Amino acid sequence: MKLQYKLKNDINEITSALVGRSVIEDQNYPYVKECGGDSCKIGFAGDQMVGLGLSSASYETIYNGFVGGRAFNFMMLDGGIVQMSYIVQGGEVSAHRLAYYPNPRIGSFQEHPDEYDRDDYLTEINERRNVLTLVRFDFDASERSFKPVLHPRSHLTLGQYSRCRIPVSAPLSPVSFVRFLLRHFYSNGSTDFAQILPHGSTYDFDRTLDPVEAQEIHVEVPKIRPIDTSSPVPCHS
Amino acid sequence: MVSVINGSTTKPVATARLLDFFNVHSEYDGVLYTGYPVIGCPTGPLSIDAIWISKARGVIVFCLEEGRTVASSSLSESQEECYAQICAKLMRSRALLRKRKLCVEVSVVTFMPARANVSEFSTEECDVCNVDSLKEWIDGIEAPIDEIIYTNVLSIIQSVSSIRKGVKKRTVEIENSRGWRLKELEDSIANLDNKQGQAVIESFEGVQRIRGLAGSGKTVVLALKAAYLYAKHPDWRIAVTFHTRSLKGQFKRFINAFVLELTGEEPDWRDLEIIHAWGSAGGGQNEGLYHKFCLEHECVWRDFKSAEMLFGQGNEFNGACSEALGCAKKHIDLYDAILVDEAQDFPPAFLRLCYEMLAEPKRLVYAYDELQNLGFSALSSPEEIFGATKDGTPLVTLADSKQDIILKVCYRNSGPVLTTAHALGFGIYRIPPQGGTTGLVQMFDNAQLWREVGYDVERGTFSGGEDVILYRSSESSPDFLARHSDANDLIMFEVFESKEAQDAWVVEQIKKNIKEDELMPDDIIVINPNPFTTRVNVGPIREKLFGLMIPTHICGVDTTPDVFFDDNNRSIAFTGIFRAKGNEAGMVYVVNSEDCYGGAYGSNALLRNRLFTAITRSKAWVRVLGVGENMRRLKDEFEQVKQNGFKLKFRYPTQDELKQIKIVNRDMTKDEEFEIAFRRDQALQLVKGLKDGKIQKEDLGAEMLEELRKIFAMD
């Protein structure tokens, strides 16, 4: 199957699994669009708005804008939104933008797991004690913006620090990204939501980490392995 | 005798004199409005001081003057303006035009009761009267109109707004499809009825209570009332609050549209706040009345978690409001009027908080529905809520009929649906628990309330031990709500062997609704009545629908900023019971309803209320679904309703039974339920031991026996 359809299927399957467990409240379907040449885009309804995220508007304005335009793949039960887009060129992933925007107003799921689980209508009445963190994994295979360490091909941005570009070893698959989010941002201490995710397709992403970047703190993305059911250790995917 | 509806007035003295006049001269009839209508003009809202409509004299507009003198040019100017605007309003209805002329005469007079001699103000163009000359002037008007015109005029003047409820664009092609039938329904519900209009206009300088059953239009009435007060009193600070957070969007839409219609402009939201009850830090859309109160009085603000810890589960808001009230050192005027919707879901302490925030004369309007309270016991009387002054006189009594308005016509649910909801809500056909004499889980304290919510007595009386049969008249449940479908289609109960079977059935039905019945996704709601199981239960259904490319969402946390969603975002709402109240739809599926059956004791009233609320979300069709034995029992109750022709036939409980019903079915926390189960078990053991002879009653000791005798002495 062509790469772009593998990606689209994965996103659909992820969405379906999360809907089934009521981890997400609202969702859109991903689309594949041919862009001329041999490139195509895998995106979501409203993704033309993502530029808003880079504007100098306040976080609340940005978040409200996305929610108002329903510009997301899905919205988590506590209002956090997930945006995933990919560009595929010549049969390879040439760029991706995987972003998570938390709800600025209401306590997150991790802060109040009980209230969310029991659909408590008073969940909104809480002091937001924790700091918000946006998470964005960006990837660009082209040489256009690449600068070793300063602007790695694959990088992780935390918060709204515009020059935060933590080197990442390779592009991420949709399942990798969502698994990362669920594990670290949506765990309630007892249920591991990451387990409900499908395995997704296997991808063969090349390592894109520059040797100089390897000398700095960076994020290592494990290579996808097929499932080994004899092994007791949970598989990375 | 003239019927009077008193709106909100800025000319109290002259208005009072005018009312006196009509009180004295009881030979006149018709309807008199004071402080109403308010008409939106390019220059701003025009407030008509008083208008009288009668068959003998057509329409008479009164311009009131409080003082003794006024410039005569401004006199004729106001008269001209009133005349022009009233005629324009009337002319909008073709029924009042004949040969392009208005077929009802509109006369205008200025009423200046404070002036002894008005003749020097009266001119050719402009009549001025005081109390002495008014009768002569009125008798000089000969402008009779027939019954039909009279009714039409009343209806136009009365119709505070002709806002249509549905702004949805709907394309229907198949005749009589569900979509087609819904469109017809939506087109019929356009104007307010008399009672609703009265509820909007009728103003009282004090506390006002609006009671109405589900679907009676309370929310619209409250929104209109807020808009009307805002239009009349631009200097007032008004707040509108509600319990279900998702109502905020609805209120905003309604009020915006109404104010636009009444004043020609959009409201200044700083003076007309649509605000949550609790609220949290961060300002803007998070603001709430309680939070504001805490800020102004510099009291500690509690969030939900801390309130739960401090005041106990189930007592969070009550504790928080009581604490804030206790801490406030002096009175601060924060609002001139507060309107509270869904008052039954708030603890009395919150209403007291609102009362405290108001400037004199404490214009608090609260709307509620007896059966829809989902958490607290039925709303107490105002004497109980607001308490008394130091010498014992209650702060608030609803002595005047204008203070207590009842809306008994239900515009959302058809007769069969509503009767079923009431039957199940009260447990009319419920099998009595073992040893009990009645299956009822709750009953109105005052039997009069049955009539007030729109039931007529077919046979029998409300006497303890006597049979009574109640039914909904076509007045209180308009026929057009039920005509479109067969009764068996309006409401259905289904029992399934397993949850999977239930879920599969729902998916199939929804697929049919979307693909064949011409329903839009937002015509459908799926409700799970038990808040603890909503997320778990709705997941599988939504997953299947996602696979079928049918859009769905869960009504979860309130993330919407203050924007209006457009028609393009159509999606099936899946909701728990608490958020269901912000929604209504043509097709409602209530899943896992077995959780509402209840048991021998323990929060039964609450469980049945949830079922009531779920069923009454429907504008047309309801499917009540569930699994297992309890669902079967619920279905049996429904079958009885059907067999009785959608009437309530039951033995009215005795006084003792009424007491018993209240106690046994009261709201309980899980801890209390556990405690009861535990103690019952212990008591059972004791009885068993005594019966089997394992112990003798003398073994309990004389003291213990005496205690037991005292406790169990029946009265």
Image: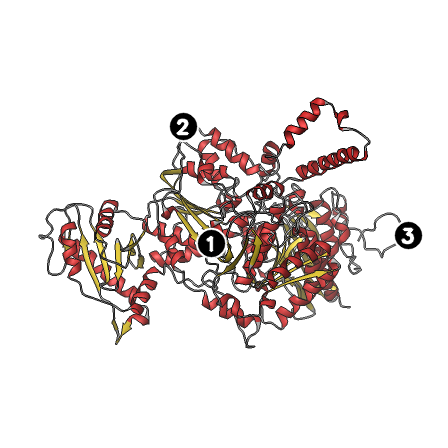
Image position, residue A232 (x, y; %): 88, 48
Nearer to us: label 2 or label 3 = 2
| Nearest the eye: B280 or B481 | B481
In which image quadrant can residue B681 be found? top right
Q: Chain of mark 3?
A: A
Q: Are marks 1 and 2 in contact (CB under 8 Å)?
A: no
Three-letter code, disc 1: Arg
Disc 3 target residue: A230
Circle 2: element type: loop
Q: CA distance from mark 1 to mark 2?
A: 36 Å
Disc 1 target residue: B451
Q: Is residue B291 above or below residue B79?
A: above
Which mark sits nearer the N-terminus, 1 or 2?
A: 2
Mark linked to residue B390: 2
Instruction: Give the residue drawn at x 40%, y 35%.
Output: B395
Q: Residues within 10 Å of mark 2 (few under 14, many from 20)?
A: few
Can residue B469 be seen here? The reply is yes
Three-letter code, disc 2: Lys
Considering every residue shown, the one lying at the far right of the view is: A230
Q: Is residue B85 above or below residue B120?
A: below
